[in-house]
Amino acid sequence: MATKTNFRWVVAILIFIIYTIAAADRANIGVVLPFLKKEFHLTNTEAGGINVSADKNVDYTPCDIETLYAYNPEVYVVLSHSRNDTRSFITGSNLADIAAVKTNQVFSITDDLLQRPGPRSFTGLVKLAEILHPQEMKDWETK
């Protein structure tokens, strides 16, 4: 019969440490954001985009076709599970009169980058900045 060891406690402690680090990592963006806004004197609209549903007092604004037509955005950013969702969105005949579709200004960002707080949120914000400010962000990587 094999002797009993305390290895299971080592594994349990390691799992606890990993989850603690992961939770702290996700919380960092929420903690740092107010300091970044203060340091760079930024408001929400200074990033160059105006959320057309900002006046809604909900976490997630459902947006059906009628609402999208009412907003008629110049740029439309689709948060999607895959990177190829915009092709089907642009080719839909029921959306042909929306300004963003007419000017081919429909973009997709993987929802994982912006809807889950954590270090990848920065990547999502960079992608959003590249969409809203392509000229300014062209040589951003080289700076």
Image (tube, helix red, strand yellow):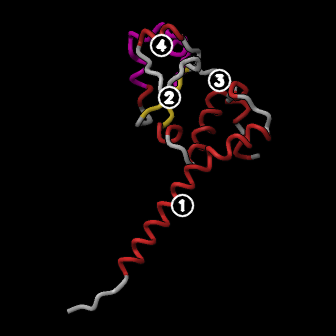
Q: Amino acid at mark 4?
A: Leu
What span is in magenta? 87-107
**113 or 101: which is nearer to us?**
113
| Contact between labelled residues 2 and 1, with CB atoms less than 8 Å apart | no
Point 50% across, 42% down: residue: 116
Magenta includes 123? no
Residues packed near mark 1 inside 10 Å, few (<14), some (14 to 19) or many (20 plus): few
Q: Which mark is residue 49?
A: 3
Query: In this rendering, would 136 be left or right of 5?
Result: right
Point 64% across, 33% down: residue: 130
Q: Where does label 1 land, which residue?
A: 21
| Contact between labelled residues 2 and 4, with CB atoms less than 8 Å apart | no
- Label 1 and label 3: CA atoms lie apart by 33 Å
Q: Amino acid at mark 3?
A: Gly
Q: Which mark is residue 68?
A: 4
**16 or 113: which is nearer to us?**
16
- Label 4 and label 3: CA atoms lie apart by 16 Å
Among the two numbered marks 1 and 3 on one chain, the one whose residue lies closer to the N terminus: 1
Among the two numbered marks 4 and 2 on one chain, the one whose residue lies closer to the N terminus: 2
- Relative to 38, residue 47 above or below: above
- Label 1 and label 4: CA atoms lie apart by 40 Å
Residues packed near mark 4 inside 10 Å, few (<14), some (14 to 19) or many (20 plus): some
Q: Quadrant of residue 33?
A: top right
- Relative to 88, residue 42 above or below: below
Query: In this rendering, would 4 be left or right of 10?
Result: left
- Relative to 47, residue 99 above or below: above
Among the two numbered marks 4 and 3 on one chain, the one whose residue lies closer to the N terminus: 3
- Label 1 and label 2: CA atoms lie apart by 26 Å
| Residue 28 x, y percent position in the rendering | 62, 50
| Residue 62 x, y percent position in the rendering | 43, 21
Q: Quadrant of residue 92?
A: top left
Looking at the rendered structure, the secondary structure element under dot 3 is loop
